[in-house]
Image: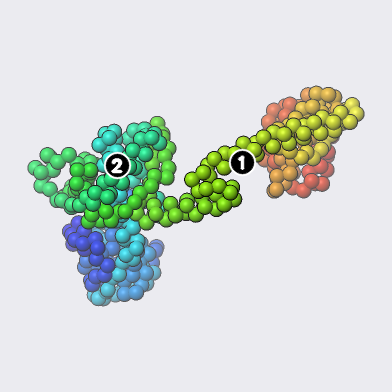
Amino acid sequence: MEEMSELFYQDAYLREFEAEVIDCFPDKKGYGVILSDTLFYPEGGGQPADKGTLNGLAVIDVKRKNGAVVHYLKDEMAIGTKVIGSIDWNVRFDHMVQHSGEHLFTGVIHQMFGYDNTGFHMGDECVVLDYSGPLSKEDLAIVEQKTFEAIVANIPFEILYPSKDELAKMPYRFKKEIEGKLRIVKAGDVDICACCGTHVHLSGEIGYLKVIGLSNKKDGARVSVLFGQRAIDYMKEIYRQNQEISTLLSSTALKTSEGVKKLYDDYHEKRAELSLLQRRMLDEMIEAYPLSNDVIIREINGDNNLLRYFCEQMVLLNKAEIAVGLLANGKGYNYAIISHQRKLKPYAKPLNQALNGRGGGSDEIIQGSFECDLKTITQTIVNILK
C-alpha cells in the first residue's frame, strides 16, 4: 500500500473500517499486525498514534515501519483474518483539533515574525511548540487573538498534492527534501505547510485556544498551548479555582488578584515582625550563655537565616568554640555548624555519612540537612566534634 493512501488520509472523520491481516509477527510489545488498509494514524510528525480496537482487541500502539503501518496488540492474529477496526473518536478528534490549531497558531507567528517552527510535540496535556526566535508575553497575546479570529472565521483546511512545478512556486513552510509526493495542508491565507497529520475540515471546529506557557532560550522560544476541549477544560478549572479563592477572600471573581496581593503583603509584614521577635528572643538566649570553649548544640525555631544567626553570634561572642544550630524540617533537621577556631570542612563527610545527611561548606561553616532523630544527631555531633 502506497504511503499517504491509507484510510485516515482519505477521510479523517471515519470511525470504523474493515480490512484483512496480511502479516503478523512477534514483537517486544506483543505482536505487530499489518492490515490491507487502516484507519489508525501511526505516531509521527509530533502527533501521537490513534487508539482503538481490532476485532475488540486493544491496539497498544501504531507506528510506521519500512513504509507499512504496524498495529501493536497483546494478542496474535492469524494472517487472512478479517477484522473490523474501530478508532477512539474522542482521541482522534482531539488530535485533529490540536494539530489544526497548531497550523493556525504557527501560521500567524510565521506571518508576524518570520519564524520557523523548529519543534512540535502533541502531549497528553498540551501542545509544545518551538520557534526560531524570541517571543514576549505581549507578542503571544496578539498571536492568541489573531489565531482565535482565524478559528471563528471558519477557514477551510485543504489537502494538496502538488506537482514539482507547482511546489516550486508554492510559499509553504517546512521546506525540506522529501522523496515521493509531498502532502501540503493549506488553511486559507493563514498557513500553508508540508504536513502528514490529520486535520479538521473547518477551523471553526477547533473552537477555542489558550496559551499556557512561554520560555525563551538562546535559539528561540518554546510555547505551550491548548486547543479545543483542552482549552475549555483548562479555563473551567481556572474558573473553579478562582471561585474558591474569591469565596475565601470574600471578594468578587474579578478582584481575586487584589485580595491575594493584600493577603501576600499582610503575610510578609507579619513574617517580618515574627522574624524580628524571634531574633530578639535569640539574642536574649545567647546573652544568657556563659563564655565557653565547648561544642554548643541548640534546636532553633524560625528559619535558616535565624539558624545561621544563632551560630554566628555564639561564636562571635565567645559563647562556644563550635556552635551547632538545628532546625526541624519535617524529614529531619537542617543544620548549621560554625567555628572560628576549628577547621570544620573535614567533619562534613563523616557527619553526613553517620546521620544520613547532605551538605558541606568551608573550614568556618558547614551546613545542610540530616534525616535522623534529634537525640541521635546530638550524640553523634558530640562524638565526632569533641
Residue at 25% x, 56% y: name it: 200
Q: Position of residue 306 (x, y in %)?
A: 74, 33
Q: Viewer-nearest of labels 2 and 1?
A: 1
Based on the displayed image, in which of its 4 quarters is residue 284 positioned?
A: top right
Q: Quick one: SS at disc 1?
A: helix
Q: In this rendering, would 352 be left or right of 175?
A: right
Which residue corresponds to the image point at 31% horizontal and 61% vertical from the top-left?
92
Q: Position of residue 66 (x, y in %)?
A: 25, 56
Nearer to the camera, 235 or 46? 235
Up the image or down, 150 lies above or below 276; here it is below
Of pointers 2 and 1, the one earlier in the residue sequence: 2
Q: Is residue 247 above or below residue 129?
A: below
- The kind of secondary structure element at disc 2 is helix
| Mark 2 to mark 1 CA distance (whole Å) | 36 Å
Q: Give left or right: position of 312 versus 253.
A: right
Identify whether 4 is placed above or below 83: above
Residue 189: give x, y in percent of width and height: 19, 43
Residue 46, image x, y percentages: 33, 50
Which of the two residues, 108 or 54, is positioned nearer the viewer here? 108
Q: Badge 1: how crowded within 10 Å, few (<14), some, or many (20+)? A: few
Q: How is the image coloured?
A: rainbow
Q: Nearer the viewer, residue 339 or 33?
A: 339
**Disc 2 packing (10 Å; few <14; some 14–19; many ≥20):** some
**Residue at left offset 35%, top offset 35%:** 139
The answer to whether marks 2 and 1 mark residues whose Cβ atoms lie closer than 8 Å is no
Find disc 1 in the rendering and name its residue.
263
Residue 141 can be seen, yes or no: yes
Q: In the rendered structure, which amino acid carries the disc numbered 2?
A: Lys
**Which amino acid lies under the numbered mark 1 shown in the image of this protein?**
Leu
User: Which residue is denoted by mark 2 in the rendering?
Assistant: 146
